[in-house]
Image (cartoon, rainbow, N blue to C red):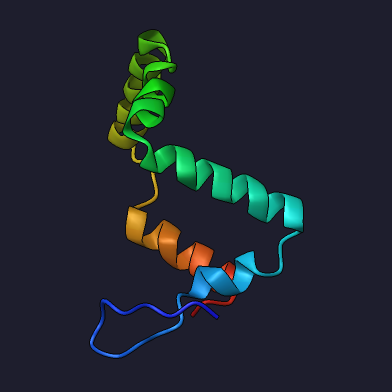
Amino acid sequence: MIMTGCVPTNTVVPYWNEIKNWSREDRSNLAKLLEISLDEEESSGLANAIPVEFLEMASEYALRESHAGRTVPHVKAMNWIKEKRGWK
């Protein structure tokens, strides 16, 4: 059980309950990704590895979908995920 100390009282972070059920390999892969994300040189390298054209296409698609009303608000998506994972 992981506890956080940056809130008035220590609370369990719900996703840690999920992670502890993962296989050793999956937890190891997550740790590697977290380590890379904390290393400024490598994380900027990962971001720079995404082609600009792809980012432009993705943003244009997202904008078209938003204007067409075919999007889900972030809060609604997060609530759905929490509900499916049993975090609510």
Q: Is residue 64 above or below residue 79?
A: above
Instruction: Tell me what residue is drawn at x 55 percent, y 81 percent.
Output: 1
Residue 39 can be seen in this image: yes
Q: Nearer the viewer, residue 49 or 69?
A: 49
Q: Nearer the viewer, residue 68 or 47?
A: 47
Residue 32 falls left or right of residue 65: right
Rendered image quadrant of residue 60: top left
Q: Nearer the viewer, residue 63 or 37?
A: 37
**Residue 24 screen position, x and y as percent:** 74, 57
Q: As drawn, which residue projects farthest toward the left?
A: 8
**Residue 83 screen position, x and y as percent:** 53, 72
Rendered image quadrant of residue 9: bottom left
**Residue 43 screen position, x and y as percent:** 39, 31
Q: Is residue 36 above or below residue 86?
A: above
Q: Is residue 63 above or below residue 27?
A: above
Residue 70 can be seen in this image: no
Residue 18 falls left or right of residue 14: right
Instruction: Tell me what residue is drawn at x 41 percent, y 40 percent.
Output: 37
Instruction: Tell me what residue is drawn at x 34 percent, y 53 percent.
Output: 73
Q: Nearer the viewer, residue 61 or 34?
A: 34
Count every numbered label the image shows and give the total: 0
Residue 25 falls left or right of residue 78: right
